[in-house]
Amino acid sequence: MRRVLASGCVDGFAELKELSASRGPTGEIATEIARLCSGVRTQSKVLDSSRSASAPSIPAAGQSLPATAGASALGLDRRGRSRLVPALTLYGIWAGIAFDVLADIDGDRAIVLFPLLGMAGGLAGSLLATQTGEITSGQAWSIITGLEYGTVSGLLWAGAADASTDKGIVGTGLVAGVAGGGLGLLVARYRPRAGAVEMVRSGGIWGTATALMLALMSPSEPSSQAMLTTLAIGLDAGMLGGAVLASRIPISVSRMLLIDAGALAGLGFGLGATWLIAGSDGHRQMIGAGGLVGLLVGIGTAVVLTGDMDSNADALATATPTFPALVVRDPRGHFSLGSFALAPVVGPPGSRRAVTGATATLFGGTF
């Protein structure tokens, strides 16, 4: 009987029915438990049949799933599609504008044609390319990052090289963006985590900001070419540094965004405080130094304050409820189906029935 109760009326039910035929208190207890278990087993069969009817069916080999049901049935992560499609649509618009510049398209109406075609091509192409299969947020952001930062880096280097025409600058940006997108697509094959890609993106942003502050701190006022060269180096070096850190330090998107907020607040406070102290006549070197110190302090403070953020999240994610209840609440506040178990209620001494009923916990967990 103990085995039947511990298994939720699954194991040893046949032996329990045989035991119920015996006489004496043991037989009465076995009869009552068998009666309760019969009802539980009937309810379990109904629940299992309803679950199987509502669950998506997985086709056999050689059969195909509908495009809309395949991902959910196979449990694929396709959250990155909603990020990649808008990004590629915008990049199609930029490609159309770049083509207008490269082809010397002129006229009030003609200049709109290729951006529209680029937008349509980016939208349709991204929808078709992501119609099936898995695409995680990390994969989507790696491609988006390659396109965006490759374009910006190309434009900066073209300006630093003192490109003589708009075609040279735009063409370099377009080629660099396509190359960056190809590199991002290659990285996406290794399924990077979204937090790792976010660290690379943040490295590019704050590397560029650091380079700008250093340029302001230079003894002589930098030329436009020197300024663009410094910014391009800062962008590329920041992204490279972010990639190295991302390969060694696991981090979540949430924590990385909070570090970005700390960096932004530190930079703003450093620039603002320096401006309040020095006034409008303050030297650019002082302003650059204040901004750089604020940026570094903001990043360092955010890193320290969010040090336990990911470890606490992992602990909550791996925590399992310990309550045998039909509906269980975990430490994160999420409800899920648990286990259904009966506990017999023993009658008072001298009663005709040794077992007068059974109890079951409907709700349990951490509250």
Image: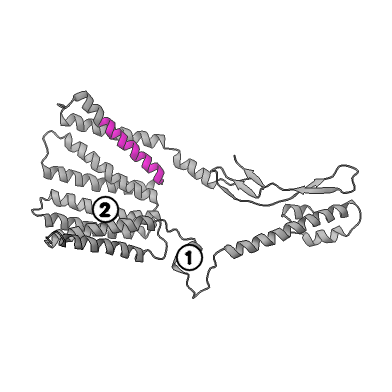
Residue 312, placed above or below residue 75: above
In screen coordinates, is 352 left or right of 42? right
Residue pushed farthest front? Answer: 109
Q: Residue at x 33, y 40 (%)?
A: 260
Q: Which residues are magenta?
A: 250-270
**Crowd around label 1: few <14 · some 14–19 · many ≥20 (10 Å):** few
In this rendering, would 163 be left or right of 254? left
- Image location of residue 338, percent across then percent down: 63, 51
Residue linked to disc 2: 148
* Residue 259 is inside the magenta segment: yes
The amino acid type of the residue labelled 1 equals Ala
User: Marks 2 and 1, how far apart in space?
Assistant: 32 Å
Q: Secondary structure at mark 1?
A: helix
What secondary structure is the stretch in magenta mostly built from?
helix
Tag 1 residue: 69
Q: Earlier in the sequence, mark 2 or mark 1?
A: 1
Q: Quadrant of the C terminus?
A: top right
Residue 1 in the magenta stretch? The answer is no
Residue type, label 2: Glu
Q: Position of residue 333 (x, y in %)?
A: 55, 43
Q: Residues within 10 Å of mark 2 (few under 14, many from 20)?
A: some
Q: Residue at x 89, y 58 (%)?
A: 22
How far from the left and from the top, in percent, is residue 148?
A: 26, 53
Vertical arrangement, residue 216 with respect to residue 70, above or below: above
Q: Disc 2 or disc 1, which is closer to the eye?
A: 1
Q: Nearer the viewer, residue 262 or 166?
A: 166
Circle 2 SS class = helix
